[in-house]
Image (cartoon, rainbow, N blue to C red):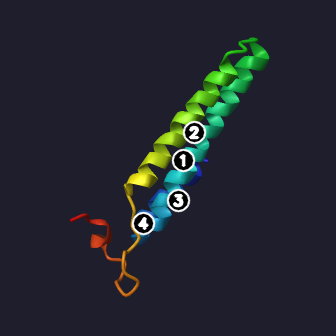
């Protein structure tokens, strides 16, 4: 997943595609979530740390809350507010 995220980001940058760059960020987030989940499960299964799994769940919840807050606040959006308007670079600038 990290390699895929890097490739998506490079391609999005080369094409000037904000959508592909945002997709690269989501792919990177998916990789982080997978690592956290597998780490918690592995520590629980191998070492017997029963608290590792709930800690991993808290880590996932923190990342999800952060992403939700960014979406709610409109951070890094690139959607034009008017359908007749093109998707130029100034579409997300706030007044």
Looking at the rendered image, the quarter that the C terminus falls into is bottom left
| Nearest to N terminus: mark 1 or mark 3 | 3
Q: Secondary structure at mark 4?
A: helix
Expressed as whole percent of the image width and height from the top left, the position of residue 37 reads 67, 32
Q: Which residue is mark 1?
A: 28
Name the quadrant containing residue 56. top right
| Nearest to N terminus: mark 3 or mark 4 | 4
Q: Tell whether label 1 touches label 4 (CB within 8 Å).
A: no
| Nearest to N terminus: mark 4 or mark 1 | 4
What is the C-alpha distance between the residues marked 1 and 2? Answer: 6 Å
Q: Is residue 24 left or right of residue 84?
A: right
Residue 33 in sight: yes
Q: Secondary structure at mark 3?
A: helix
Circle 3 Cα neighbour tier, 10 Å, few/some/many (<14 / 14–19 / ≥20)? some
Is the residue 75 above or below the residue 35 in the image?
Answer: below
Circle 1 Cα neighbour tier, 10 Å, few/some/many (<14 / 14–19 / ≥20)? many
What is the C-alpha distance between the residues marked 3 and 2? Answer: 14 Å
Expressed as whole percent of the image width and height from the top left, the position of residue 69 reads 44, 46
Q: Nearer the viewer, residue 50 or 23?
A: 50
Label annotation for residue 47: none
What is the C-alpha distance between the residues marked 1 and 3? Answer: 9 Å
Label annotation for residue 18: 4
Is the residue 83 above or below the residue 31 in the image?
Answer: below
Q: Which residue is mark 3?
A: 23
Q: Which residue is mark 2?
A: 32
Q: Tell whether label 4 touches label 3 (CB within 8 Å).
A: no
Question: Which residue shows up at 76% across the image and 12% down it?
Answer: 48
Q: Secondary structure at mark 1?
A: helix
Name the quadrant containing residue 81. bottom left
Question: Which residue shows up at 67% across the image and 15% down it?
Answer: 51
């Amino acid at each position: 997943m990290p390699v895929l995220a890097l490739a998506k980001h490079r391609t999005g940058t080369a094409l000037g595609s904000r959508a592909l760059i945002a997709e690269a960020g989501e792919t990177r987030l998916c990789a982080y979530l997978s690592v956290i989940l597998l780490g918690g499960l592995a520590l629980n299964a191998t070492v017997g740390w029963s608290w590792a799994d709930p800690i991993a769940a808290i880590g996932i919840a923190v990342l999800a809350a952060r992403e939700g807050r960014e979406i709610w606040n409109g951070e890094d959006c690139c959607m034009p507010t008017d359908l007749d308007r093109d998707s130029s670079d100034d579409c997300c600038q706030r007044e």
